[in-house]
Image (tube, rainbow, N blue to C red):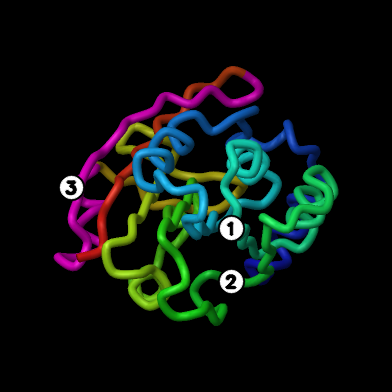
Amino acid sequence: MSNQTHWETVYRNKAVEEVSWYRPHLEVSLRLIADSAPSASSAIIDVGGGEATLVDDLVAQGYSDVTVLDISQAAIDVAKSRLGMSAAAHWITGDITAVELEPARYDVWHDRAVFHFLTSAGDRAAYVRQIARSVRPGGHVIVATFGPDGPDKCSGLDVVRYDAEHLHGEFGPKFRLLDSVTELHETPWGTPQQFMYCLCRME
């Protein structure tokens, strides 16, 4: 089964609140984005944003250029329907390791729970190249994965768990680590999951 088929199946068969990574609001992400993007005109991309409410909250806070990218059209359709018509929101359906993004388009790159699904070194390198191409110099990169004590599988797929040092190490010296945050996320059915966030600046 292809990655796209897998995720289309997940999102077509589970309600928004029935996936383990669901939170009503992504509080840690919102704080890190606010620290990284003080201007409402900052261009933000949410990679793997899917059905998440981050785009709703960013638009409600006045951000005027928010892109949501997800491999699943079904997930994108849910978010678009919920948000309604908004000139501030842009939508891309595609695989982050292969989709074509505009060069130097974004001030902030946000990813909560995509990178840890990239279990091959080639896919991780392709992901980092996407950031280096599409984030402006001086822009910020926020990536969250399962931490060292997090699950080793999610949605039936293997994941790679990271501490801050090893997560930052995947990106290299062009990315200056500014902050790291550990979050204990509670799934909708009450199971704790450890997430590790890294905030970097493109040098």
- Report the magenta residues as a range: 164-189
> How many marks on residues?
3
- Label 3 sits on residue: 165
Which amino acid is tagged 1? Answer: Asp
The quarter of the image holding the N terminus is bottom right
Q: Is residue 53 magenta?
A: no
Q: Is residue 166 magenta?
A: yes
Q: Position of residue 111 (x, y in %)?
A: 47, 52
Q: Nearer the viewer, residue 67 or 43?
A: 43
Q: Is residue 50 left or right of residue 12?
A: left
Residues under numbered marks 3 and 2 in contact, where contact means CB atoms less than 8 Å apart: no
Name above or below for residue 154 compared with residue 129: above
Which amino acid is tagged 3? Answer: Glu
The crowding category of the residue bearing disc 1, from other C-alpha atoms within 10 Å (few below 14, some 14 to 19, many at least 20), is some
Q: Position of residue 67 (x, y in %)?
A: 60, 60
Q: Secondary structure at mark 1?
A: loop
Q: Position of residue 154 (x, y in %)?
A: 55, 44
Q: Quadrant of residue 93?
A: bottom right
Q: Secondary structure at mark 2?
A: loop
Discs 1/2, front: 1
Q: Is residue 170 left or right of residue 141?
A: left
- Label 2 sits on residue: 95
- Label 1 sits on residue: 65
Q: Secondary structure at mark 3?
A: helix
Identify the residue at image location x=65%, y=37%.
60
Earlier in the chain: of badge 3 and badge 1, it is: 1
Discs 3/1, front: 1
Q: Nearer the viewer, residue 89 or 109?
A: 89
Distance between the alpha carbons at the discs numbered 3 and 2: 26 Å
Identify the residue at image location x=25%, y=56%.
201
